[in-house]
Image (cartoon, rainbow, N blue to C red):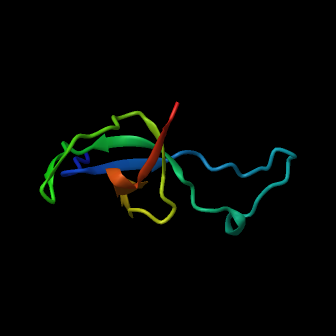
Amino acid sequence: MKIKPLFDKVVVEDTEIEEKTKSGFILPSAAQEKQQTARVVAVGPGGVIDGKDVTMQVKEGDVVLYSKYAGSEFKVDGKEFTIIKQSDILAIVE
């Protein structure tokens, strides 16, 4: 199944969560915070949103930092994704 976001929406997939600290301690899942970096899977076309012309600044494959509580999580074919507004993206990681 292919995901095609609308308007200024971006579909992201969380990057792998570190289960060990640098010193080798294993973190239980309850101690891990929600991941804030993700890989962009699909990007909407942009366009006129609330009377303003929105140009998309991210593209598929980019790794981005996004607001902690942004977006809606969902599953497609057993994989977890988050759909967020482009304005919730804080930075592109290079």
Whether residue 84 sits left or right of residue 2 in the image: it is: right
Which residue is farthest top? 94
Looking at the image, how many numbered discs can be counted on the residues? Answer: 0
- Return the residue nearer the eye: 71 or 1: 71
Residue at left offset 47%, top offset 43%: 91
Residue at left offset 33%, top offset 34%: 59
Whether residue 78 sits left or right of residue 54 in the image: it is: right
- Return the residue nearer the eye: 51 or 31: 51
Residue 18 pos. (x, y %): 68, 48
Residue at left offset 32%, top offset 49%: 10
Image quadrant assignment for residue 34: bottom right
- Return the residue nearer the eye: 46 or 33: 46
Which residue is farthest right? 23
Residue 70 pos. (x, y %): 42, 62
Whether residue 74 sits left or right of residue 37 in the image: it is: left
Image quadrant assignment for residue 73: bottom left
Residue 30 pos. (x, y %): 68, 69
Which residue is farthest bottom? 30
Q: In the rendered image, is residue 1 in sight?
A: no
Residue at left offset 59%, top offset 46%: 16
Residue 37 pos. (x, y %): 53, 47
Q: In the rendered image, is residue 92 in sight?
A: yes
